[in-house]
Image: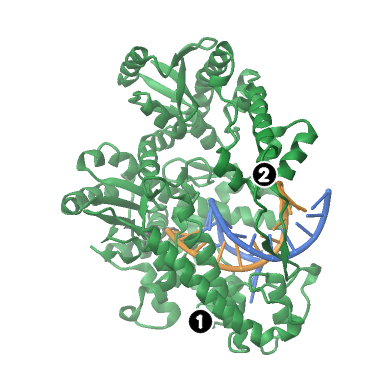
Chain colours: A green, B orange, C blue
Amino acid sequence: MLIAVDTEWARDKPFCLSFSSQPGTATVIRADQVQALTAFNEQLQEPETLTVLHNALYDLPVLAQMGVYPAKIADTMVMAYLLQDEPQALKQLAYRHCGMIMTDYKDMVEAKTEELALDYLLQIVSQPWPKPAPVLEWAKGEPKVRQPQNIQRKALRILKAGKDFALKWKTISEGKEIVEERLGPLRAGELCDIPHEDAVFYAARDADATIRIYPILWERIQSQGLEGTFWRDMRMLPMVINMMKNGILIDQEKFAELSQYFQTKMDQIQGRIQLQVGKLLDNKVVNPGSSQQMATLIYDKLELHLKGGKHKAKKGGKQKSTAAEVLKRYVGLHPVVKDIMDWRGYQKLKSTYADAIPKLVKEDGRIHTHLKVTRTSTGRLSSASPNLMAQPVRSEEGRRIRDCFIAAPGYVLVSGDYSAIEMKVVASESADGRMLEIFWSGGDIHTQTASDMFGIPTDKVDAKKHRYPAKRVGFGILYMITAEGLQRELAADGVDWTLQECEDKIKAWFRIYSGVADYMKRNGEFAKRYGYVKDMWGRRRYVPGIRSTNKWIRMEAERQAGNAPIQMGAQGIIKEAMGRLVPVYPDLGIKPLLQIHDEILWEMPEEMVSVALPIIEEIMCASVPSTFLAPVAVDFEIGKRWGSMKDY
DNA sequence: TGAGGATGCCAC
DNA sequence: AAACGTGGCATCCTCA
Ligand SMILES: Nc1nc2c(ncn2[C@H]2C[C@H](O)[C@@H](COP(=O)(O)OP(=O)(O)OP(=O)(O)O)O2)c(=O)[nH]1
Ligand SMILES: [Mn+2]
Ligand SMILES: [Mn+2]
């Protein structure tokens, strides 16, 4: 039994759901029709009912609020994502495959939206507003104080235009806060605002479109052998939803303290820079955040350059890079260089983390990220607002940010991270004897790489100082880094190898792991012949650039084709594990908080650790194809704060 | 004064 | 950085 379902939301709560089992027909149940919803839920809980949704990540939580819990789901948006040549939007899918022309939600409620906006703007112009605070801006390296327009004048301007009130208000980014504080945000028209028949028709049409599209996409999924990949994605979705719902508790005071601390540091450093080089820049205020100004300072005024290096302008009129990787080499030449780098470091930590994250906290004191499952070309998840997958961990100061993410009282944070995961995937895929031997004998390939590049014994390898840079070098070589690229990478880590040495190292690496070399070669040939590559689970990535006449595009596609089967294979492992964990973890009373590509972060009662960890470990390690050739290991860490977790 | 490119940098 | 890959995000700057 196939039922397509869609939900509608209005005024901060579920408005209705629609369902369809037959193209051309659909039924709507209002959110207040309790009996109907109960009966409907019973139907969806039947094991033989397949509930088809378009964007389950959105609909499942809404359905849950209506007391509807489908037993088995299929998501047409994920299907379109896997197929890669389909649009992900329902309306475009419906047009392409069924010729349905569907009214956009925005158009549907536009009249009401405009009415509300007009009323809102009239309210604004009819009352006085405080003069907005002057803002400090940078204009071509010079600080300027700008007096923003009063919001009243802005509103008046929109009114005078006579149309698109809501749209124009939306584009205003400055000065809306005080209005929203007093009047609340501008409300858009919603389904509850338009005539009932129109709302019903609109809602029904989405379910109708979904039921029509499903068989068409399913046929294509089957013909490409993507069924396994598709159902694996479906099985793990509940855990992704749960992660977003759970969120992570933060220590807001600590964030504020850190912000202060970073600001103090920046002020100190800026003062020093000003004294050192202000004169060179005509005594203008030095802004280390302006790469342009810094390029002028470093290359034109100070004329810093390496021995033998010529001072020459960049071709094409582009400014020379002032990225940390480059600046690092000039540190010994002038004290301002280190100051610029340090200032940037604090600026990054302050603006991206310390200041930004507390603004996103919800009433439960927790940060709820938006996880996306259809946004990467390799099947990885992505995280946004904030991107919890990119919280600092590698620097001491940065880890203080992570320390602001904490476990609730009585709970602990637990993380489980696959060991050397993509190396194991490629070892298995290529059946490379040498690499498999490392893993089977309990060796750590990243530590070996570190020992090699830093010229130190493995027992002297430090996790942060040596092993992390070694990861980049190891994966760099695997994924076809050039000798020049490797030299640059090593130089950034303070390792100075000649170009020849780098070239030899890459050659030697692929000679040692000759099975990997053969595999990469076969994979590249497959890509050229078929225009796509696939991983051990059957997931595909199309690489059209592989046949481009543009050399840069073609080479880029070759590297993407080399990386894709391996990154896809690794993400498939963790998705498989998540799917297997879905029926297990709720009964353990443990909460999944986040997936970070090859890691799962949990929050659990302290007393659950000894019970839950072995179960999680068992499942994660077992979630590989039966043909997988490498041993799988997961490293667990535990702690009260995310930045101070200890090996378990 | 907002959109979007360029630059730089956080994570895996 | 310039030719390891996958992401998201803040700031500066130019342009309209
Ligand atoms: N191409 C590329 N892939 C990377 C890089 N860093 C991480 N990855 C990918 C490959 C890794 O296997 C995977 C997970 O990252 P981890 O930091 O967990 O490293 P890995 O599992 O290899 O080692 P570990 O967990 O420390 O034993 O993400 C990188 O710099 N380049
Ligand atoms: Mn790992
Ligand atoms: Mn990891």
Mark 1 chain? A
Q: Quadrant of residue A89?
A: top right
Relative image position of residue A81 (x, y in whole percent): 53, 36
Comparing A389 with A459, the one in front is A389
**Disc 2 with disc 1 on a shared chain:** yes
- Is the residue indicated by label 2 positioned so its CB lies within 8 Å of ligand 3? no
Picture quarter with ligand 2: bottom left
The image shows residue A412, relative to residue A172, as above or below, that is below
Report the disc number at residue A321. Answer: none
Relative image position of residue A479 (x, y in whole percent): 52, 61
Q: Residue at x 28, y 56 (%)?
A: A414
Q: Which residue is mark 1?
A: A495
Mark 2 chain? A
The image shows residue A74, relative to residue A339, as above or below, that is above
- Tell me which amino acid carries mark 1: Val
Q: Quadrant of the C terminus of chain A?
A: bottom left
The answer to whether residue A517 of the structure is visible from this angle is no
Mark 1, Cα crowd under 10 Å, few <14 / some 14-19 / many 20+, is some
Relative image position of residue A356 (x, y in whole percent): 51, 57
Secondary element under disc 1, as helix, strand or loop, is loop
Q: Residue at x 39, y 14 (%)?
A: A33
The image shows residue A627, relative to residue A23, as above or below, that is below
Q: Quadrant of the N terminus of chain A?
A: top left
Q: Residue at x 70, y 83 (%)?
A: A278
Position of residue A46 in the picture relative to residue A564 (left or right) = left
Report the disc number at residue A128. Answer: 2
